[in-house]
Amino acid sequence: MDNVKDRVKQIFTEYLRINKHRKTPERFAILDAIYSIDGHFDIETLYGIMLKKENFRVSRATLYNTIVLLLDAKLLIKHAFGNTAQYEKSFNIETHHHLICTTCGRVSEFQDEELQRDITNVDLKKFQMSHYSLYIYGTCGRCAAAARRKRKQIQEKEKK
Amino acid sequence: MDNVKDRVKQIFTEYLRINKHRKTPERFAILDAIYSIDGHFDIETLYGIMLKKENFRVSRATLYNTIVLLLDAKLLIKHAFGNTAQYEKSFNIETHHHLICTTCGRVSEFQDEELQRDITNVDLKKFQMSHYSLYIYGTCGRCAAAARRKRKQIQEKEKK
DNA sequence: GTCAGTGCAAACTTTTTGCAACTAC
DNA sequence: GTAGTTGCAAAAAGTTTGCACTGAC
């Protein structure tokens, strides 16, 4: 499925042409790196991946610069859970929703086509939707189980 | 409708009691300030409001500390659009959804009970939802109109 | 009286910016 | 050749932390 990488490269090239930006090797290396990552990543992670996997050294400043372009080109989505901005490739990716555990902080994803349809079909009057993010906060199964165990322990202690 | 402020004060008092935290004047002043703000705010704005409106001087550190408690007590919701964390009172507030214009950055809100029902009824297996945030990105009516005007101008220039 | 909580300043983290060097065009 | 880009380092912005002092209990 590497034609995804080819497709996004095409789209980005076109975007750069139209907006009169230069086609620098840094930009394409960053795009390529991003499209080899599954799921979310922050700048620091991307920086590390570029170094290791792509064997391409770019400065953080260039990462930030390029990310602005990719966001604008709709090839990247920016999330904002936690303190650091999280990014995620967006081309050819199924829209998914996020579950964020407020206890352990873990973020997982789920898909629900019906929900997706409900959201994209909402009447927003003059507002033109380009994309959306749904974050559901709560307690994940693991943390709920841990909390139950803890409660049980306390109860048993009180019995003694 | 100032019984909202009284109610949240009660809830917070109870929360502090159960969790063995002290009932300091700072904490209640912050709670009061937050519940006089409509819509979103960040720490800096809250800091300013405390100074002016409530005439109560607290350090930023205390704001951050107290906000953790209020989040835990479910009296406050944390949002994350833009760079800075945004907060919003949550008690007795209708769940609403957010429209974020990617051109001008303005954030507006809308309600849709059916959509709200659709989201809260999704089957999340073992995950227990406490609340959710829906952010819809796109172009607001104003910016779309501005873009149309601009496009028209360019076209007319090309005719000459 | 004790210790949680506060204010302050320093530290830390993430992101932005200014500037000299570089290179795509 | 030149203007857009890059890398670096410094600065800015937002948040956290350490510590001495204060005040809720």
Image (cartoon, coloured by chain):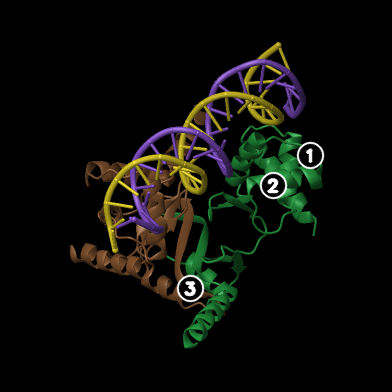
Chain colours: A green, B brown, C purple, D yellow
Amino acid of disc 3: Met
Q: Is residue B25 above or below residue B51?
A: below
Left or right: residue B17 versus residue B7 is right
Q: Nearer the viewer, residue B47 or A127?
A: B47
Same chain for labels 2 and 1? Say yes or no.
yes
Residue B127 in the image: state x and y as whole percent. 54, 75
Q: Is residue A140 above or below residue B49?
A: below
- Report whether residue B96 is seen: yes
Residue B45 in the image: state x and y as whole percent. 34, 44
* Secondary structure of the residue carrying numbered label 1: loop
Q: Which mark is on residue A46?
A: 2
Residue at the spot 48% in from the left edge and 52% down from the top edge? B138
Q: Earlier in the sequence, mark 2 or mark 1?
A: 2
Left or right: residue D8 versus residue A103 is right
* Secondary structure of the residue carrying numbered label 2: helix
Q: Which residue matches tag 1?
A: A56
Q: Is residue A14 above or below residue B99?
A: above
| Chain letter of the residue beneath label 2 in the structure image | A
Left or right: residue B15 versus residue A98 is left
| Chain letter of the residue beneath label 3 in the structure image | B
- Report whether residue B42 is seen: no
* Secondary structure of the residue carrying numbered label 3: strand
Q: Which mark is on residue B129?
A: 3
> Label 2 to label 1, Cα distance in Å?
11 Å
